[in-house]
């Protein structure tokens, strides 16, 4: 049986985290070779161990490697993408690394250094990944390629629980991705944004901790009555990465259990 990503070379940023790790596993299952990248080398090593346990080399056609990359450093993302030149060149990049800093808040609360740090990782990281991906696609004469950039549903609807830098950064991801999609459409390079709702991953759950009130304030808005799971995002990424989505371009691909379309949710 041929996988949906058979023969494709992919990079995942933030691959040691919730969405990144689940996506890596599915990509390998679908026949891709994957370079897992993350700023945190320790968690990256244990993420690779998990991957090898779940999908050992004997049961996959592609390879998997890791590389420490801080996406806010252009030279590091450039080097990661160049690493795939010897694999036959990049086909898919999932620019997924992002932070939501605990000191972020409303306009008065958010410190300037946290604003800058959030923008450097969440926005510049996506820009650098997209820019060097385009160069690699051209270098290898790719006629089909896919870039998936992780935004968030907070880029689409306002929240009375503000994290202004984070929200602004994700709005920038949506706008940037849309424009890149139009610019490169005739080269066959597709760009789509993934817009997850709040999830059961460390990014949000570590921040919520045991605070039941904070948790309920968010959970009540889900028609499903629950947060999303990383794997539910990963399935969407596989679709966007594969040629099945060949006519899907410039979308804000919302995976939110209906949250952004709900007014009053079921009791
Ligand atoms: P996560 O915290 O589990 O994973 C994020 C990963 O990014 C971590 O492994 C972290 O080490 C890595 N990272 C942080 N800074 C980096 C940098 N400078 N360079 C490279 N890697 C870096 O979070 P997740 O939930 O898997 O989030 C993935 C993406 O999804 C993020 O962009 C996040 O903003 C977005 N998102 C998450 C949620 C949610 O509720 N979890 C909702 C909407 C959007």
Image (cartoon, grey):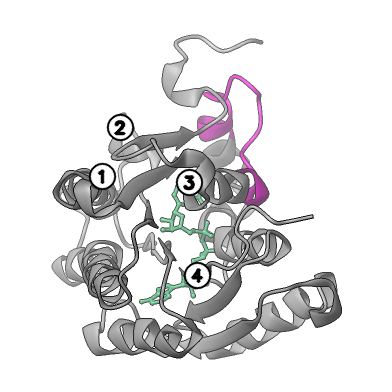
Q: Secondary structure at mark 1?
A: helix
Dot 4 or dot 1: first in sequence order is: 4
- Asked if disc 3 and disc 2 are in contact, CB closer than 8 Å, the reply is no
Q: Which residue is mark 2?
A: 156
Q: Is residue 123 visible?
A: yes
Which span is picked out in magenta? 216-232
Spatial CA span between label 4 and label 3:
12 Å
Q: Is mark 2 within 8 Å of ligand 1?
A: no
Q: Is residue 217 magenta?
A: yes
On residue 174, the disc is 1
Dot 2 or dot 1: first in sequence order is: 2
Few, some or many C-alpha atoms within 10 Å of disc 4 (few <14, some 14-19, many ≥20)? many
Residue at 60 percent of width and 58 percent of height? 5
Spatial CA span between label 4 and label 2:
28 Å
Query: Residue 72: x, y in percent?
Result: 27, 78
Dot 4 or dot 3: first in sequence order is: 4
Q: Secondary structure at mark 2?
A: loop
Q: Which residue is mark 3?
A: 240
Few, some or many C-alpha atoms within 10 Å of disc 3 (few <14, some 14-19, many ≥20)? many
- Asked if disc 2 and disc 1 are in contact, CB closer than 8 Å, the reply is yes
Query: Residue 171: x, y in percent?
Result: 23, 44
């Amino acid at each position: 049986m041929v996988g949906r990503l058979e023969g494709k070379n992919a990079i995942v940023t933030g691959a040691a985290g919730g969405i990144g790790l689940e996506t890596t596993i599915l990509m390998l299952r679908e026949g891709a070779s994957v370079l897992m990248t993350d700023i945190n080398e320790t968690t990256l090593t244990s993420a690779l161990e998990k991957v090898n346990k779940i999908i050992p080399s004997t049961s996959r056609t592609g390879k998997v490697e890791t590389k420490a990359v801080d996406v806010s450093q252009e030279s590091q993302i450039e080097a990661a993408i160049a690493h795939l030149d010897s694999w036959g060149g990049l086909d898919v990049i999932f620019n997924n690394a992002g932070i939501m800093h605990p000191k972020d808040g409303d306009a008065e609360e958010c410190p300037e250094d946290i604003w800058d740090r959030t923008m450097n990782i969440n926005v510049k990281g996506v820009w650098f990944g997209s820019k060097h991906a385009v160069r690699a696609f051209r270098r290898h004469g790719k006629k089909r390629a896919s870039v998936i950039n992780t935004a968030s549903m907070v880029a689409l609807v306002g929240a009375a629980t503000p994290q202004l830098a984070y929200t602004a950064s994700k709005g920038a991801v949506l706008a940037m991705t849309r424009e890149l999609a139009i610019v490169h459409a005739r080269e066959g390079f597709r760009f789509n944004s993934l817009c997850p709702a709040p999830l059961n991953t460390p990014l949000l759950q570590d921040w919520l901790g045991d605070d039941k009130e904070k948790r309920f304030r968010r959970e009540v808005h889900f028609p499903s009555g629950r947060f999303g799971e990383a794997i539910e995002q990963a399935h969407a990424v596989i679709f966007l990465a594969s040629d099945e989505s060949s006519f899907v371009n410039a979308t804000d691909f919302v995976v939110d259990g209906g949250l952004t379309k709900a007014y009053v949710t079921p009791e």
